[in-house]
Amino acid sequence: MTTFKTARPLLTGLLLATCATFGQAQDKVLNLYSARHYQTDEALYANFTKATGIRIERIDADDAGVLTRLKSEGAASPADVVLLVDAARLWKAESEGLFQPVRSAVLESRIPAALRGRDSGQGSSWFGFSTRARVVVYNKTTVRKDDVDTYAELGDAKNKGRVCTRSGSHPYNLSLFGAQLERNGPEKTEAWLQGVVANMSRAPKGGDTDQIKAVATGECQVALTNSYYVARLMRSDRAEDREVVDKIAVVFPDQQGPGTHVNVAGGAVTANSKNRAAAVQFLEYLASDQAQAYFANGNNEWPAVRGVKMANPALDALGDYKQDPVSVAAVGANQAKVQQMLDRVGYK
């Protein structure tokens, strides 16, 4: 069920010094539709209000729910900014005209071009603010790293009965599969997906954390997950989470090839925003060093801005890795084809 929230004031009273450059705007409201459901983001929003005087009113839903609502409301939508957690969904919304281009020296200097939407000549329509890798976790006692250090090996017969995943139709998997389609073509990709299905230890179910725990308990031996789910468990103080971490290992696939698939969480100004200036101001705030560090330290995502200092031992432990540079636009455009493949091979 979609809920309506007003961001709570930051109790610590810390004021971001750099946000002073963004100006003061008393009694202004920014309407935010967000697919980010992370408790740690509350302070992120409250910091913006503290620094600018712009109050955030937020509606939470998943990516699909946010976009469905935005489309149904049309020109009457109160939304000023949208935050989504999947590059393909950002691309889809961009292609459907739900965003407006933004020309910002701050955003263009800080957010790499590969993590921005298409530049129409009037600016980019969306900007990525954090990244997460689609990694492989495996059971340290039963699986050799060399057998699972590429995405292709998840469909290899040597891993029969070992693999578990969440639904193939979940956006995180669709984006990965779309990238594989772009790189390897339809025949190889469909054959690979068929191999993954044949190697499953059980039908797809649950979320990414469930896959990690299934590897630790022996329900399966190998799984796909976003990196920040692993990092959360690594930073947990709960004994049961530490036990899970002790039983698994993580590999960034295809480091000797094109690199590991990366997804982004990003934001955009809506096409019908009634408060464009504050919306752009908010996006620029998300690109600030303080906000970028919060993505890393608060939710275990890698900052989009290069050189931002982190204080996250889990991300430090995971280390650097080679990223697959495949086009976000191509990944988004491949979604429908991938879904058809999933239906044909019985990947639920």
Image (cartoon, rainbow, N blue to C red):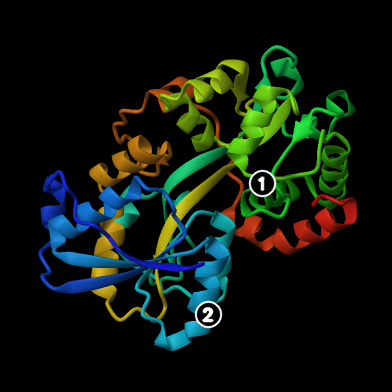
**Rendered position, 45 above or below 277:** above
Q: Which residue is mark 2?
A: 71
x and y, in percent, of residue 272 in the image = 39, 81
In which image quadrant can residue 294 be found? top left
Q: Is residue 238 visible?
A: yes
x and y, in percent, of residue 61 in the image = 49, 64
Farthest residue to the top: give it: 141
Q: Is residue 258 visible?
A: no
Which label lies toward us, 1 or 2? 2
**Residue at position x 61%, y 40% in the image:** 208
**Residue at position x 27%, y 77% in the image:** 275
Which structural element holds mark 1? helix
- Amino acid type assigned to the residue bearing label 1 in the image: Leu
- State left or right for residue 16 relative to residue 256: left
Farthest residue to the front: give it: 239
How far apart are the alpha carbons under marks 1 and 2?
26 Å
Give the class, few, some or many, for how many residues have Cα within 10 Å of label 1's Cα (few <14, many ≥20).
many
In which image quadrant can residue 152 be found? top right
- Amino acid type assigned to the residue bearing label 2 in the image: Lys
**Rendered position, 131 above or below 331:** above
Q: Of 57 and 130, which appears nearest the observer?
A: 57
Q: Which residue is mark 1?
A: 176
**Residue at position x 51%, y 25% in the image:** 241
